Amino acid sequence: MADHRERLNHDPLAWLAEEAAPEPAPAAVEPAHPASPTPPAVPAVAEAPEAITPPRSAEPSGVVELEEMLTVAQAGDLQGVLLRELDGRAEVVVDGSRVERVDAAALQVLAAFSATLRHQGGQITWQRPSASLCEGVTLTGLGELLGLEGCAAHLR
């Protein structure tokens, strides 16, 4: 029975706790030339693949031209552009002709904008939605919410 207890009390992952213990910090070393301090290291910053081109003006125009890339990386910029258009306008025209790549995050932003605009009594009018945009809308089932019900027929 003692043999059984030893196996039950054995923690096969105990070695992880031992390895995870922090190592002591190395002792500080004085620089050889105190007159020329070493600049602090700057962490590398990854660049966004392609950002949405800033609008020509910050004023709402009633027309939104979507960029080629509409992914999670551009969703925040897209939201800012669309929010400027929510000024009680009855109609916002969205040109989707340039869209080459779209993901669920960008479609979610467009869907939230469409729902908010409809709640305010307005609507989206689409101009030339690209095949890529239509494919994303069809795959996510957001055609009705976005006012792009005809996208499925556009892909056939």
Image: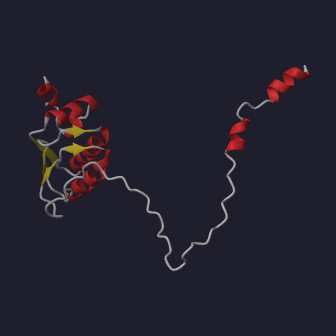
Relative to 91, is 1 on the left or the right?
A: right
Q: How many marks?
A: 0
64 w.r.t. 99: above or below: below
Farthest residue in the front direction? 32
Indicate left or right for 16 with 148 as reference. right
Tell me what residue is drawn at x 19 percent, y 36 percent: 133
Q: Is residue 130 left or right of residue 2?
A: left
Residue 86, located in which quarter of the rendered image? Answer: bottom left
Residue displayed at 15% across by 45% down: 124
In the rendered image, the quadrant that contains the N terminus is top right
Viewer-proximal residue, 54 or 60?
Answer: 54
Q: Residue at x 57, y 72 (%)?
A: 31
Q: Quadrant of residue 155?
A: top left
Residue at (13%, 43%) from the top-left corner?
A: 98
Q: Where is residue 40 in the image (x, y as percent from the top left)?
A: 48, 67
Looking at this view, name the residue that lies furthest to the bottom.
35
Q: Where is residue 18 in the image (x, y as percent from the top left)?
A: 72, 43
Residue sitting at the far left: 128
What coloring was used for the rendering? secondary structure
Q: Which of 129 and 51 is in front in this view?
A: 51
Residue in the foreground of this view, choosing between 17 and 96:
17
**Where is the C terminus found, in terms of image quarters?**
top left
Q: Which residue lies furthest to the right in this view?
A: 2
Compared to 140, does 37 lie above or below?
A: below
Residue 125 image position (x, y, % from top left): 12, 44
